[in-house]
Image: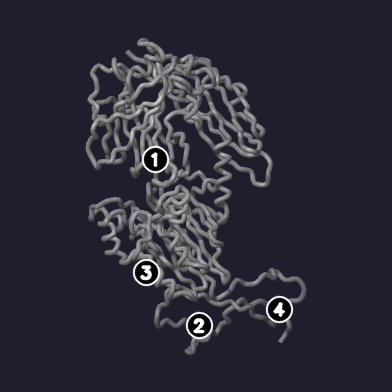
């Protein structure tokens, strides 16, 4: 036989299916199940250079790959989950795990719950490999939904084994945020029977380790039982996967990797990898030494350490300490504008120099002149504040309606360093307007209902300023406000509707009111001093109907002791009416007062032990200390 015809075989084990089908004999196997064709890579023996590398063939018989799908709901976006199913059918994982929130839920109507499960199970029917169900808070939010879960899927916690790996599906919803005593006892027995597992993988919905650590740090009682779970895990090799928070972070705990995953169609701003906000499935390859995890975006792949606990804290610090402020041009809606000046200020208290590239978009183009240009570059060294002025002029007067879509879109990045930090910010208003505060012919009945008010024209819209735990805000359906104002001889009134997809203890509406004369309000760098008031309206606790009128403190100076408020629960949030004594403005101006500045802020807790997201109608990140960009409400007759 010629030397060139010699061959050698590098063994390649064939990985069998996850769940065997009995009685099947492959056609290429003989009666003794011995393959006629070698199970391996057949390479020719060659002299000299070879057209392949010397790396080993990844053919370990215990290697396998699974996919992990995360939240489909909590403000789900139709079509994303099915798109992921289609991608997984192409990728061919051995099987698919989940971490809950599969349906919208939060209903006690069996027909509605059944319809949602029917729709979801239709997605699973289209999946070409086995899928393992895990319960999320949307799936088992009340006793009826627990009952429906058991009807379809049996137990809410279970385990199984595959190729020496122990899989454990838990429920974080025994009660709110808790592994209950019965489940904990089961887990203790289950793990004791699997001490020889080469690795243990845990899947559940809420990241209980985060909730547990926050409770401990705050000095509160920890009801999660997570420390007990970690004690049961001991030093066995393990990895943990959860969802719920709709943004991705990889954690290191006790030498092990814990993950809370982002979304597979759930509500998200989708601001990208630095924020941990993307639609994905996690792809786990089990190696002899443990699992390797990558994140498959539906259009790409993200490494598991793209967002780490340390990295996201650095990124949040970058966001908090680099601020671009745009002082608005105050415009009368009837008169329009022919020219104006936009003052920009870049405050950099971060420890690296930053650069902003900004564009003004949405200005009418007829006879438009922008100097220096519509595309701006502003730089600021660490600890520096840079100021910039943009002059805008039109060849004719432009009505305010033509200017309401004007945006300042800014891309900010650190300058220098191996891995620059980047972010994008959008300012919804750079040319501001006067908002009318009309005189009311009849005194409103303070009952929390808004049917007798005119249209609620003012709203936070699609892209409000979100501060605090901004990563928790998942879009306008999560939290926002639509409102209006008015006055009579005794009160200033605010009335409106707060959107809130899930009311939680601590949710409230805050109103900040600057009652000073307009010249004073706009001086001294827009800082808040004497004549600024604040009040907080707690969300209603009743299931339906209006609440009784209550008094809330009105904080500020000169002192006005309290305001009257009433609220009412609504299908997608709650409505409110607020009456602020007219003395707030008359004491600071006169009974001939001209205007006031104000902004409502929706405070939204997703979990009571977490920081809230705050959706600000008008303002800047410094809204608590400055009135920049608050609405200007001008007295009407």
Q: Which numbered disc flags the more N-terminal residue, 2 or 1? A: 2
The answer to whether residue 244 is visible is yes
Cα–Cα gap, marks 2 and 4: 25 Å
- Marks 2 and 4 in Cβ contact (< 8 Å): no
Residue 186 is tagged as 3
Secondary structure at badge 2 equals: loop
Seen from this angle, which residue lies furthest right? 48
Q: Nearer the viewer, residue 545 or 410?
A: 545
Q: Quadrant of residue 48?
A: bottom right
Residue assigned mark 2? 28
Position of residue 555 in the picture relative to residue 355 (left or right): left
Q: Residue 498 location, x and y as percent?
A: 34, 35
Mark 2 crowdedness (10 Å alpha carbons): few <14, some 14-19, many ≥20: few
Check if mark 4's residue and mark 3's residue have beta carbons within 8 Å: no
- Quadrant of residue 39 within the rendered picture: bottom right
Quadrant (top left/top right/bottom left/bottom right) for the N terminus: bottom right
Which residue is labeled 1 in the image? 604
SS category of the residue bearing label 4: loop
Which one is earlier in the sequence, the residue at label 2 or at label 3? 2
- Specify the label residue 45 is tagged with: 4
Q: Could you tell me which secondary element the residue under label 3 belongs to?
A: helix
**Residue 141 location in percent, x, y?**
31, 54
Q: Nearer the viewer, mark 1 or mark 3?
A: 3
Mark 2 in CB contact with mark 1 (< 8 angstroms): no
Spot occupied by residue 536 in the image (x, y as percentages of width and height)? 36, 32
> Relative to the observer, which residue lies in front, 402 or 289?
289
């Amino acid at each position: 036989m010629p030397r060139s015809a010699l061959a050698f075989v590098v063994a390649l084990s064939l990985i069998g299916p996850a769940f065997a089908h009995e009685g099947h004999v492959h056609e290429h196997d003989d009666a003794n199940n011995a393959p006629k064709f070698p199970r391996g890579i057949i390479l020719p023996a060659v002299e000299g250079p070879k057209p392949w590398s010397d790396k080993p063939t990844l053919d370990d018989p215990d290697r396998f790959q699974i996919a992990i799908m995360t939240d489909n709901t909590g403000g789900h976006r139709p079509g994303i989950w099915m798109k992921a199913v289609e991608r997984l059918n192409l990728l061919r994982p051995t099987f698919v795990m989940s971490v809950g929130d599969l349906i919208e839920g939060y209903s006690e109507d069996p027909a509605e719950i059944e319809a949602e499960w029917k729709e979801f199970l239709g997605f699973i029917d289209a999946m070409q490999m086995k899928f393992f169900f895990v319960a999320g808070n949307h799936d088992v939010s009340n006793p009826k939904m627990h009952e429906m879960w058991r009807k379809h899927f049996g137990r809410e916690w279970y385990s199984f084994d595959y190729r020496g790996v122990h899989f454990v599906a838990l429920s974080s919803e025994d009660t709110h945020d808790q592994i209950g005593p019965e489940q904990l006892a089961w887990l203790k027995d289950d793990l004791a029977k699997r001490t020889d597992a080469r690795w243990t993988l845990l899947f559940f919905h809420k990241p209980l380790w985060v909730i547990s650590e926050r409770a401990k740090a705050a000095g509160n009682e920890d009801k999660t039982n997570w420390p007990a779970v970690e004690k049961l895990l001991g030093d066995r090799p393990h990895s943990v996967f959860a969802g719920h928070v709709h943004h991705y972070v990889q954690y290191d705990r006790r030498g092990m990797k814990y993950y809370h995953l982002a979304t597979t169609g759930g509500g998200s701003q989708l601001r990208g990898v630095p924020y941990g906000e993307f639609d994905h499935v996690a792809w786990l390859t089990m190696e002899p030494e443990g699992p390797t995890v990558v994140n498959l975006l539906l259009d790409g792949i993200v490494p598991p350490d793209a967002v780490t606990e340390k990295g996201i804290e650095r990124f949040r610090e970058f966001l908090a300490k680099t601020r671009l402020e745009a002082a608005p041009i105050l415009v009368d809606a009837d008169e329009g504008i022919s020219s104006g000046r936009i003052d920009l200020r870049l405050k950099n208290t971060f420890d690296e120099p930053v650069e902003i590239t900004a564009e003004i978009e949405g200005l009418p183009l007829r006879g438009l002149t922008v100097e220096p240009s519509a595309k701006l570059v502003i730089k600021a060294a660490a600890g520096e504040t840079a100021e910039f002025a943009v002059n805008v002029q039109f060849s004719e007067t432009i009505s305010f309606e033509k200017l309401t879509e004007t945006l300042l879109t800014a891309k900010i990045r650190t300058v220098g360093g191996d891995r620059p930090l980047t972010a994008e910010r959008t300012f919804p208003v750079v040319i501001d307007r006067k908002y009318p505060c009309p005189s009311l012919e009849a005194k409103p009945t303070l009952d929390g209902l808004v049917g007798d008010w005119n249209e609620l024209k003012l709203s936070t819209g699609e892209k409000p300023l979100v501060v605090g735990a901004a990563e928790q805000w998942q879009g306008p359906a999560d939290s926002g406000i639509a409102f209006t104002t008015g006055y009579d001889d005794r009160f200033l009134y605010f009335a409106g509707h707060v959107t809130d997809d899930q009311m939680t203890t601590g949710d409230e509406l805050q109103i900040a009111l600057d009652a000073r004369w307009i010249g004073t309000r706009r001086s001294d760098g827009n800082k808040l001093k004497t004549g600024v008031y604040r009040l907080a309206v707690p969300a209603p606790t009743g299931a339906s109907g209006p609440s009784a009128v209550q008094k809330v403190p009105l904080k500020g100076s000169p002192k006005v002791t309290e305001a009257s408020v009433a609220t009412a629960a609504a299908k997608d949030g709650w409505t409110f009416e607020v009456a602020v004594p007219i003395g707030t403005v008359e004491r600071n101006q006169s009974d001939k007062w001209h205007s006031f500045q104000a902004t409502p802020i929706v405070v939204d807790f997703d979990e009571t032990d977490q920081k809230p997201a705050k959706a600000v109608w008008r303002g800047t990140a410094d809204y608590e200390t400055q009135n920049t960009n608050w609405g200007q409400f001008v007295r009407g007759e």
